[in-house]
Image (cartoon, rainbow, N blue to C red):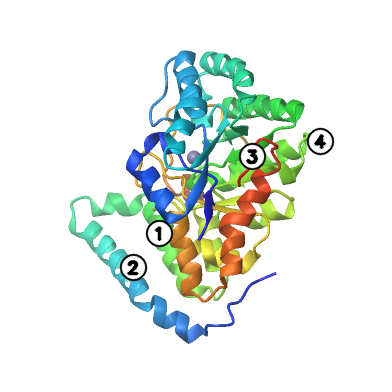
Amino acid sequence: MKAIDPHIHMISRTTDDYLKLAVSGIHVVTEPAFWAGYDRCSAGSFRDYFHQLTVAEPARAARFGIRHYCWIGLNSKEAEDIELSEEVLALIPEYLDRETVLGLGEIGLNKNSRNEIRALERQLALAAERNDLVLIHTPHLEDKLKGTRIIMDMILSEPRIKPERVLIDHAEEHTIGEIREKGFWYGLTLYPHSKGSPERAVDAVEIYGPDRVCINSSADWSVSDPLATLKTANEMRRRGHPEELINRIFYENPKSFLGQCPKFHIA
Amino acid sequence: MTLPCRNKSACEILDAYFIENRARMLDIASFLDRIDRYDGAGEAKADFRYKALTQALKLLSEREDDRTKALQMLFSDLSIEPVDSATGLKTTGAWEGAFHEGN
Ligand SMILES: [Zn+2]
């Protein structure tokens, strides 16, 4: 089968993982800018990171026939340092025009603080001005419900951003309904312990239907699995779902959402 | 909108997933026993996370539908105001505010 992983942090993975993706049928990935596992101390570190995302990583992926796209943004965990976040926000626009950048992401909230909201507001304004796609990171665990609601209110109060051009990621059982009702795309993340499992992701597809959903691994530097999307496709097969539906969830859906950016084209 | 899979019955679902879920139940039981066995069990059991787990177990035995969403809500921060600063705040998996005295 063919699959697209719309959220995977390849800079944290080995080159062997590119080979695994390639031989397993994942030939397109999109990588949001995120927290490195530690707080960076200068804007220069972000400059290097955005260079890695837009130059080094697509080249590493291409060796395996994989198309690598990315998203640029300031993650919410590093928004608490106002001075640094101002410097990073100022350098983001120059990267957004690069040829493999699909839009702003992953931007959102972490602990639902005022400074996080401020940085998100600034980046949403930038997306609105430029008519860019947006990939939203919702908070973890107990903070998810509150953060998802604040984020959706912020986006809906910006009339220039159309909900169908926003994917609200890391959705779970208590947030999917509200995200869908408001017209956004939603992402289900297959991440051990803190997010969802293949079984629960397939349950959500069964309950809510196949519209406006993308499933991703969010594989990164922590315990995670770059083949999690394919294992979830297999869970659908185990329950007897048809290949056509599986193809829609893991290939056609991400292609439809991402394809709203004219820079995204796959053979 | 829902997509029931016509190829499977509820009994087939039970067959397919029973053993792994039985194992999960045993893991939870032995986790609770482990807390009892170690020093300071009383303190651990007064923790809001332990209380949230106990409520979750009760909810599972009492509710007859939509259990997953109900559990998610039980573990969620239900406040609506942004916090002033995220500095030093940790994510714990349950909401302390739900278990304050008188709450
Ligand atoms: Zn991520």
Q: Secondary structure at mark 3?
A: loop
Left or right of B85 in this view: B31: left
Between label 2 and label 4, give the one nearer the viewer. Answer: 4
What is the chain letter for disc 1? Answer: B
Q: In this orientation, does residue B78 appear?
A: no
Residue, disc 1: B53
Residue, disc 3: A264
Numbered badge on residue A217: none
Q: State yes or no: discs 2 and 4 in contact (Cβ < 8 Å).
A: no
- Residue A114: % across, % down: 60, 27
What is the chain letter for disc 2? Answer: B
Residue at the far right: name it: A159
Residue, disc 4: A159
| Type of the residue with mark 2 | Arg
- Residue B2: % across, % down: 66, 71
Q: Residues within 10 Å of mark 3 (few under 14, many from 20)?
A: some
| Residues indicated by labels 2 and 4 sit on the same polypeptide chain | no
Gap in angstroms between the C-alphas marked 2 and 1: 14 Å
| Above or below A212: residue A86 | above
| Type of the residue with mark 3 | Phe
Residue, disc 2: B24
What is the chain letter for disc 4? Answer: A
Which of disc 1 and disc 2 is earlier in sequence? Answer: 2
